Image (spheres, rainbow, N blue to C red):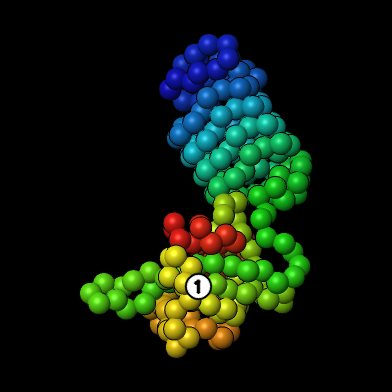
Amino acid sequence: MKITTPHGTLEGDNIEAILKEHGYDCLRGACLRDADLHGANLHGANLYDADLRYADLSGADLRDANLSCACLYGADLSDADLSDADLSDVDLRYADLSGADLRDANYVQLSIAKTSILPEEGDIIGWKKAYVDGTMLPKSVIVKLLIPADAQRSNGTGRKCRASKARVLDLQDKQGNSLPPDTTAYSGHDTDFTYKKGETIHVEDFDTNRWKECAPGIHFFITRIEAVKY
């Protein structure tokens, strides 16, 4: 394994061997983008300002690790142990934190808050892509939703959001033109789940775990263009 750092290239059989030889500060500012660190023992490692974009850290031991200012954009942290880690100014956008242990991690609430894009109170306008039957193939349409204040809602660390219920305000083509009011669209995931203007739809088994981005719920974006491009 080779790791590029601001002070040169480090080599070893694995990251644990590199830490043992060079000390726990050797990974400060290291480039570990796309690195396979599944199950790695990084207990107490200094990963300050490290580039860990898209790294596989699933199941890794990151207890007491210094991740301050590290970039974990798109990293897989599922089932990782981050207890007592320093997460100040860490970039967790699009990171997978499902099953991660975040107990007593420093600045964890602030770091997570920076990934929260939904207001905690009030109604929300949401947008999603759905489908109607076309002449030959299904045709995509855009559904405008009102997520009411009493609906459960969540987003993980990315841009996709989920809600437990929503009212269908409009069905539109991609250009924004309203479709006939009797139009019925259906979900690309479950064709039995339909959207019709004026109806309120519910998901009874809504999963409250925000880190499970693809869990049961009415999936939506908070901008129309994201739904169009999805």
Pointer 1 residue:
143
Where is residue 69? Give x, y as percent: 68, 31
Residue 84 versus residue 167: which sits nearer the camera? 167
Badge 1 crowding class, 10 Å Cα cut-off, few under 14, some 14 to 19, many 20 or more, is many
State the residue lying farthest toward the left.
Answer: 136
At label 1, which amino acid type do we have? Val
Query: Can residue 22 be seen by looking at this rendering?
Result: yes
Q: Residue at x 67, y 37 (%)?
A: 90
Dot 1: element:
strand
Query: Can residue 99 be seen by looking at this rendering?
Result: no
Where is residue 54? Give x, y as percent: 49, 39
Where is residue 62? Give x, y as percent: 62, 37
Where is residue 175? Give x, y as percent: 44, 65
In the image, is 54 to the left or to the right of 97? left
In the image, is 86 to the left or to the right of 210? right
Tell me where residue 24 sits by quadrant: top right
Residue 169 versus residue 192: which sits nearer the camera? 169
